[in-house]
Amino acid sequence: MSTVWKRWIPAAVAGVVVAGAAVAVPLSAGATAGLPGKSPQEVLALVAGSSVTAFSGTVEQTSDLGLPTLPSGTGSGSGSASHSGGATSGGTSGSEGSAGTAAAASSALDLLTGTHTARVYVDGTTGSGNLRVQVLDQLAERDVIKQGDTLWLYDSGKQTAVHATTSATADAVPTGPEQTATPQQLAAKFLDAASSTTDVSVGGDVTVAGRSAYDLVLTPQSGSTLVGAVSIAVDSATGLPLRVEVTAAGASDPAFSSSFTSLDLSTPPADLFSFTPPAGTTVTEKTVEKPSAPSGDATAPAHSASDAAKPIVTGTGWSSIVELPAGSDSSALTSSPLLAQLTTPVSGGHLLSTTLLNVFVADDGRVFAGSVSAEALEAAAAQ
């Protein structure tokens, strides 16, 4: 799928998470007592054996990454100017694409600062899985709705919507940074990244959203990563991750967090996953490119998603670096006023530095990201 949200700077965060990067959940927990003692292996088995397929709840995400305050007038969040008119279909021109990229990056960075609340509804009892996430802004909301193979991204403040068809599962839907990820999704990323480079332990029992939980702690062995520890609160009854906290190396408080503040394990009503754009919404249609057909099949598309430049991962574990090759619109990124305001000029490009993640945007449009030092990123770009 050729979509703007895949080119946003913070999209690097998603790739780095797999390599051991940083995203997490808030502190709404207190100590609790009485849970049977479990080893790290037993808590990991509890998570792996979780059979929760449907739930709803409120997720609160809190970020303190040391990012600068977003400049006014950059179009962050849903407070930018609204669009008018009916449903339309098609792409954007070069200038519109550049503006869209800047606005998208600003919106994503907005979700990486301060505190945000979202309502989450999941129904995995159906074949393809249904998902709805409502990010609640002050006077508006941004929605991600997946019902079967239909996907909607809706911004009530801007009166815009993106409609696409996908065969991906709910966990794999490319929803972009306007989704506040659930602790379940974040925990899966970190647990997949955990390896022999990670020490796994169990801390004291905690309570999250009124439920008792084990505190599973992942501590990187590498001294070259910015991540100090990842704490995952695992529901003692179901194995469902309820909270994830990421703390920077040398810090005592989480730098990025997302946690359930309420949780209902019943199946959400089916009508929550149905969506019809309100009158006046500008709708953009997106299509998912099909994989290339076998040789000789005249119906095969000339290009497929697999033809597109893919991220390149170097290094291992928590010290991995993700490289995003320069895209066709890389000049819009490197010349963006937003990039200049949020980054620091360095030799060969610009640096966006946070407590958990560094992003280096090279002058040629390549993007390097990782929970490593800026020097490590610059060295990777020079190779």
Image: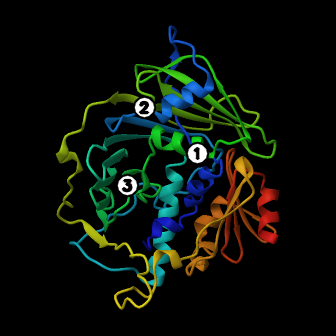
The answer to whether 134 is drawn above or below residue 238 in the figure is below
x, y percentage for residue 27?
Answer: 53, 27
State the CA–CA distance, disc 1 to disc 3.
Answer: 18 Å
Q: Which mark is residue 260?
A: 2
Query: Given contact means CB atoms under 8 Å apart, are the residues at marks 1 and 3 in contact?
Result: no
Taking depth in this image into account, of 331 and 59 the one nearest to the observer is 59
The answer to whether 350 is drawn above or below residue 135 in the figure is below
Horizontal relation, residue 93 to residue 340: left or right = left
Give the foreground label among 2 and 3: 3
Taking depth in this image into account, of 334 and 220 the one nearest to the observer is 220
x, y percentage for residue 228?
Answer: 72, 36
Residue type, numbered disc 2: Phe
Please name the residue that numbered disc 1 is placed on: 192
Q: Which circle's residue, 2 or 1, is located before the other in the chain?
A: 1
Horizontal relation, residue 127 to residue 339: left or right = left
State the CA–CA distance, disc 2 to disc 3.
Answer: 22 Å
Judging from the image, what secondary structure is the residue with disc 3 in? loop
The answer to whether 297 is drawn above or below residue 68 in the figure is below
Q: Which circle's residue, 2 or 3, is located before the other in the chain?
A: 3
Within the image, what quadrant is residue 84 found in? Answer: bottom left
Please identify the quadrant where the C terminus is shown. Answer: bottom right
Residue type, numbered disc 3: Thr
x, y percentage for residue 349?
Answer: 74, 70
The residue at 47%/57% (across/down) is 107
Residue type, numbered disc 1: Asp
Taking depth in this image into account, of 86 and 223 the one nearest to the observer is 223
x, y percentage for residue 183?
Answer: 47, 38
Judging from the image, what secondary structure is the residue with disc 2 in? strand
Q: Which circle's residue, 1 or 3, is located before the other in the chain?
A: 3
Please name the residue that numbered disc 3 is placed on: 169
